[in-house]
């Protein structure tokens, strides 16, 4: 192995992170899809990762970092100028849309996207006075060594800097509302009145679920493939048989890129961990979809009112309408996102023999479900901010459903060895007559139990029979 010299650097170092970009212009009114059109304001933060420009930028980044690391392994790196790494990284950081367009123009000639990136980088070597080193660009690599590192890097950065903060923002919003929502509430199972609960506790259910799945998502490794045309590093080994190329590749992927290299691959990565990440996001989306539907129901039941925004219109025909549009928008986008995530996680791990090209077009769509998810997260956050708890409606529902204390009464009677308490309460409550406090207390007064037990039974109300709800 040749030691690192001058401007070359050892591969084992902290992974370099690309700096964030500003807005990337696009004509919203002429975009084919809504994620880049109508909802552009909610998705533009993802453009730096999943746009064509973003993909090109990450490819250039990987090519440059590979060249820098490679120079520490081959004799040609001995006299590499000390400032070469910084100059090359400046090319990456300063990459413009115009330069990316020139790469696309080259692709029209080559009919190969990664080769067009390679040619662009070689042009930059000429401009930087590094022309003697330019044949080391993309040395011994296949396109998937670049794609299968650039793509997981894009996903990793997007999750860390866009997706996870947005989900955590919803968690914060929910936690902040818990004190305000700390009110007893009638539960509904099968759509019918059930044992009372607490409004805040019902949202703690979603908080717990989201936290658990978010933690599972964090544990999914961001893995990559880096090993030549069929995964064996043939070209590396035949040209420099004395270098431990597997160790180099492992260090490059983990140290320079912050990715976990798969040890045995075909021409492409396994996509198993990527599929696991998509499945984890899909589960989070499913929880959020469940949240949206529950909030929709609470609004329908008038447990929540919504803040009225001046100038907004709820219906083109009915002036009084204030609809839960944010949660409906989120529900629709979460469904779309999950349908695409399902295809990604099922399709990507399957490829004929050592590789077919079907993953290429599919991976270009990874940003689409994340964009629909981003739209949904924004809508949920906005919708939560509009909710106003309607305690009078919640209390009225509890007052109208005294039958729910029947469970409490029959279990206290079981404790007292009262004969057939379930059947007694069933006969009392399974009628079409309204069950009131007075009817419950009259029933209690007729029971053959002590006065102390009768008093205990009468103390149970729909408002305090909530169990552990804090």
Image: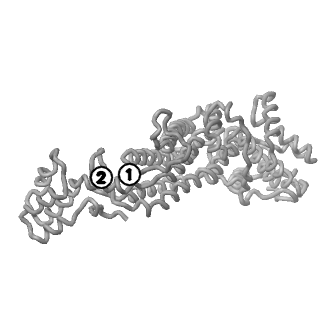
Q: Along the horizontal axis of the image, is 128 left or right of 213? A: right
| Mark closer to the chain start, 2 or 1 | 1
Q: Is residue 277 visible?
A: no
Q: Quadrant of the C terminus?
A: bottom left
Q: Pinpoint residue 327: horizontal percent, then vertical percent.
A: 48, 44
* Residue identified by numbered label 2: 397
Q: Is residue 287 left or right of residue 444?
A: right
* Protein image colouring: one colour
Callouts 2 and 1 close, C-beta under 8 Å: yes
Percent coordinates x, y for residue 382 in the rendering? 54, 49
Query: Where does label 1 land, which residue?
Result: 303
Q: Nearer the viewer, residue 419 or 227?
A: 419
Q: Residue 244 location, x and y as percent?
A: 73, 53
Residue at point 19% right, 55% down?
A: 436
Q: Is residue 34 above or below residue 164?
A: above
Point out the residue furthest to the right here. 129
User: Is the residue marked by circle 2 packed among few (<14), some (14-19), or many (20+) residues within 10 Å?
Assistant: some
The N terminus is located in which quarter? bottom right
Which residue shows up at 28% across the image and 61% down it? 463
């Amino acid at each position: 192995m040749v030691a690192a010299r001058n401007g070359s650097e050892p591969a084992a170092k902290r992974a370099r992170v690309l700096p964030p970009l500003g807005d990337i212009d696009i004509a919203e009114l002429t975009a084919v899809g809504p994620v880049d059109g109508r909802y552009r304001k909610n998705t533009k933060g993802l453009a730096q990762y999943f746009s064509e420009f973003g993909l090109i930028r990450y490819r250039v980044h990987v090519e440059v970092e590979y060249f820098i690391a490679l120079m520490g392994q081959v004799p040609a790196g001995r006299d590499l100028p000390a400032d070469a790494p910084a100059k090359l990284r400046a090319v990456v950081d300063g990459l413009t849309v115009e330069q990316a367009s020139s790469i696309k123009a080259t692709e029209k000639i080559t009919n190969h996207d990664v080769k067009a990136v390679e040619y662009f980088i070689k042009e930059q070597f000429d401009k930087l006075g590094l022309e003697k080193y330019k044949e080391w660009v993309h040395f011994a690599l296949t396109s998937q060594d670049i794609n299968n590192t650039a793509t997981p890097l894009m996903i990793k950065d997007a999750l860390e800097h866009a997706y996870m903060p947005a989900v955590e923002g919803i968690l914060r919003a929910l936690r902040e509302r818990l004190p305000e929502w700390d009110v007893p509430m009638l539960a509904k199972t099968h759509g019918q009145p059930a044992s009372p609960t607490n409004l805040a506790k019902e949202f703690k259910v979603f908080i717990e679920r989201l936290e658990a799945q978010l933690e599972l998502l964090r544990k999914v490794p961001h893995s990559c493939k880096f090993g030549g045309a069929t995964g064996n590093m043939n070209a590396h080994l035949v040209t420099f048989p004395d270098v431990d190329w597997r160790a180099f590749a492992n260090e490059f992927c983990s140290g320079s890129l912050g990715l976990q290299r798969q040890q045995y691959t075909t021409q492409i990565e396994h996509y198993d961990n990527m599929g696991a990440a998509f499945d984890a996001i899909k589960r989070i989306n499913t929880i959020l979809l469940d949240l949206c539907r529950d909030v929709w129901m609470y609004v329908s039941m008038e447990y929540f009112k919504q803040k009225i925004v001046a100038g907004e219109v709820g219906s083109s025909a009915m002036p009084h309408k204030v609809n839960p549009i944010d949660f409906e928008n989120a529900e629709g986008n979460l469904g779309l996102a999950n349908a695409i995530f399902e295809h990604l996680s099922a399709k990507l791990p399957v490829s004929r023999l050592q590789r077919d090209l079907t993953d290429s077009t599919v991976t270009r769509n990874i940003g689409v479900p994340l964009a629909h998810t981003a739209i949904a997260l924004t809508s949920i956050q906005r919708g939560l901010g509009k909710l106003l708890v309607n305690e009078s409606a919640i209390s009225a529902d509890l007052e109208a459903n005294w039958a729910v204390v029947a469970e409490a009464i029959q279990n206290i009677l079981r404790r007292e060895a009262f004969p057939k308490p379930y059947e007694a309460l069933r006969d009392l409550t399974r009628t079409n007559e309204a069950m009131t406090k007075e009817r419950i207390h009259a029933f209690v007064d007729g029971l053959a139990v002590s006065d102390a037990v009768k008093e205990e039974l009468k103390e149970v109300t729909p408002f305090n029979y909530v169990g552990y709800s804090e």
